[in-house]
Every structure is written in C-alpha cells, then in structure tokens.
Amino acid sequence: MAGIVVELLRLGPDEILRIWNSLEFDLVQILCSGFLIIFVATVYFMSRPRHIYLVDYSCFKPPVTCRAPFSTFMEHSRLINGANTKVVDFEMRILELVIFSSIDSLLKKTGIKPKDVDILILNCSMFSPTPSMTAMIVNKYKMRGNIKSFNLSGMGCSAGLISIDLARDLLQVHPNSYALVVSTEIITPSFYGGSQRSMLLPNCLFRMGSAAILLSNRRKDGWRAKYRLAHVVRTHKGADDKAYRCVYEEEDPQGIRGVSLSKELMVIAGEALKSNITTIGPLVLPASEQLLFLFTLIGRKLFNPKWKPYIPDFKQAFEHFCIHAGGRAVIDELQKNLQLSAEHVEASRMTLHRFGNTSSSSLWYELSYIESKGRMKRGDRVWQIAFGSGFKCNSAVWKCNRTIKADPESPWFDCIDRYPVHIPEIVKL
C-alpha cells in the first residue's frame, strides 16, 4: 500500500486521470469483482478464530476456622474409624463455602450478573453428586434457563485446563458470550483411613481450594481483561497401562478405598511432559530454538543416537511459569527438565507451602502469587502446566493484556510480604 501511494504521488493528478480514462470497464465485471471481494472478506472474518479473554478470576481463601495444625490432623487420622453419619452434611457445607465464596468474589470484581453468564463449566475430580454441582450453582444464583452447563468429574488435577479448553471451543461457536469456569476439589470423600503407604500420601498433600474464572469472547472486554488465551495443548497417555494406573482409585487389601500413587509416577509424568512440549514448542518458541532442536534431532537419527537431546530454552518464550503444585518432586523434576531458575518456580513452591495441593485450582493460586508480587507486566506470557490422572499433561498459554496491580481480594494479599520463604528438605513435627 505504501508503494502504491508513493507511485501515485510521483505520477501526479493529470497522469492518474489520463490512465483512468484510458481504462475500459464493463458494469458486469465491476459488480462481479466487487461481490467477490466482499465474499472473500466476509468468509475470512467469519472463519477467523475469536479472541478469548480472561476478564478476571478469584481464588478461595479458607477462613481461619478451617485451619488444622499438623498435630490435630494426625490425631484425627488416628481416630477415624469407619464411616461418619454426618459426613455428607459436612461435605455439603464445605462445598458451598468453597465454591460460592469464589464465585461471589468474581462476580463482585467483574460486575457481571449471574444471568449474564451463558456457559457454566465446573470440574471436580473426586466428588460428583446428584443433582450436579453446576445445577447447585444455577439454583443458588438463579441463572438463565438456557444456560449451557457442563460438570466434569474424574479428570484429575489437570481438569482445570480441560475446562478452559472446553470453554474456548464453546466460545468459538457462541458469539458475544460469557463463560464461567469453576475449578475445585472436594477431598473429604477420598480421605483414606487405611495403612497402605501409596494411598496415605494424598491425605498429606491435598487441601481445600477453588477458583472461579470468567472468560469472554466480546471485543469490548478486551480493554479490561487481564489476559488473552493464546494456546491450549492437551496430551493423554491413557493408552499405556502403566500411565493409566499410576494414579488409581481402588481398595486396599482390607477393603478400604483410596487413591494409590505409583512409584513410576514421575517417570510417566516426564514422558507426558515431553509429548506436550513437543506439540507446544513450535507454537511458542523462537525460530532459533526450533532450528537447534531440529538439527539435534536429525543428528541423533542419522549420525549418533547417543547425542544428548537438546532441551529448548522455554525461558525465551515465557516470562512466567505456573507449574501444578502436585508435590515437591513434581516441581523439582520440571525445574530440572526445563532448566528453570528458582524464581521461575517460586510461585509453584510457595503455593504448595501455603495452600498445599489444591488440585485443579492450584494454577490460579500460583498466577495470583505472581500478580501479588507485582511481576505481571503488559505483554508478558504465562505458561500453565498441569498433570492429572489418566495420565494427562495439559498446557495453557496466556498473554497479559495490561500491567496488573496487587488485588486486595487475592488470597495472598495479607501475607505476600513474607514470601518467598525458605523451605527445608525435612520438617520435624
């Protein structure tokens, strides 16, 4: 266009008029050409993917009354014997407290009314009552009768990104819509009261948590939204029997139900991560890193299979990393494999220290930590990585729309000055 403008200015008005008069146009040709241009432009703009914005999100902060010292937890663990007749009532009270608190906070921050929500998605792996929890939310907030609701269960700690992926697909086909995503885990029903070590670990790692996220495909929300969704990449290794059973709910020899964690979990997670980054790499890495990876791959295939594989430098693609706080070993392994610094995994470690493994919502507590530290600037890119039973490794890439200030409603707001803290290898109780 610049070249055409320069050429027209060089010719001058008299020469342009002479050329115009020398051309012969047919009315039918002009109409057909105009129609073709309009048709192509319409198809292009209609088929182009809609931008998906993360308007805002809110994480649940448990009240002081929900705290339990380690000594109390251990005492209760010893006292548990058989089913408790009041457990259902307790679960329901906790459930409403966790989910409704995060949704209330999100609606207050965004100014969205419950009837404005077009799509509702909730994921909770271990607890799936009837009526569903989405039905409970619709009833509580008196949402519209034509709302599209989905209740995902049994999909593990990476289900939060699965919910984001589902919301993205729905927002692509439903214009001018809001999607409310709720990620939570109700851990009481899956508490293990037996003695198998592989089943006792989840009792110590998991905690109560929830996050509510508001997504939009409305252009007018672009200016106020915190992030724009760039990519979602999902990897499923369930076809492999070892991967399928590495996180498995079953009964122990005494008939007590619990979730068993395999000793091969980290190896399987590493394989799933490799498959995931192989897919996401070409989407986010600069050309230089892709070429180095390609040349190393070709060299291993053609010349020497013993060559050390090249690990792309994902620090060139992202400013921030949110690694699922599944446990210390998970964070250590990803830090080593991705060659990340201590600051890159700080949000994951501090979230695990402060809130434990809140399952699918842990990624949002980590993102909130980065924001509370004042580190999130406009244009920054965030990589969320989560693992889940099945076995799955899922990733989401977000781009920050604006510099984000600390949120008074953040679960970190009253304690962020104390972090990061030193976490010893062993804590004596």
Image: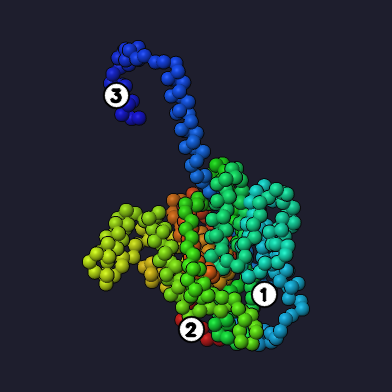
In front of the other: 333 or 169: 169
Secondary element under disc 2, as helix, strand or loop, is loop
> Residue 189 bears which disc, if any?
1
Q: Is residue 87 above or below residue 324?
A: below
Residue 413, picture quadrant: bottom right
Residue 321 place in picture, x, y as percent: 45, 62
Q: Decide: few, some or many residues near mark 2? Use Cα within 10 Å; few <14, some 14-19, many ≥20.
A: few
Q: Name the residue under label 2.
A: 426
Q: In this view, does 284 lie to the left or right of 252?
A: left
Q: Where the C terminus falls, by quadrant?
A: bottom right
Label 3 packing within 10 angstroms: few (<14), some (14-19), many (20+): few
The image shows residue 316 at horizontal and vertical percentages of 36, 58
Q: Which residue is drawn at 32% across and 26% down?
A: 4
Residue extending furthest left? 303
Going from N to C along the chain, the mark reached first, 1 or 3, is 3
Residue 268 seen in render:
yes
Q: How far apart are marks 2 and 1 (CA)?
A: 29 Å
Mark 3 and mark 2: Cα distance apart in space: 74 Å
Residue 349 lies, in percent from the top left, at: 48, 71
Badge nearest the viewer, 1 or 3: 1
* Residue picked out by circle 3: 7
In primary-sequence order, the first of circles 3 and 2 is 3
Residue type pointed to by label 1: Pro
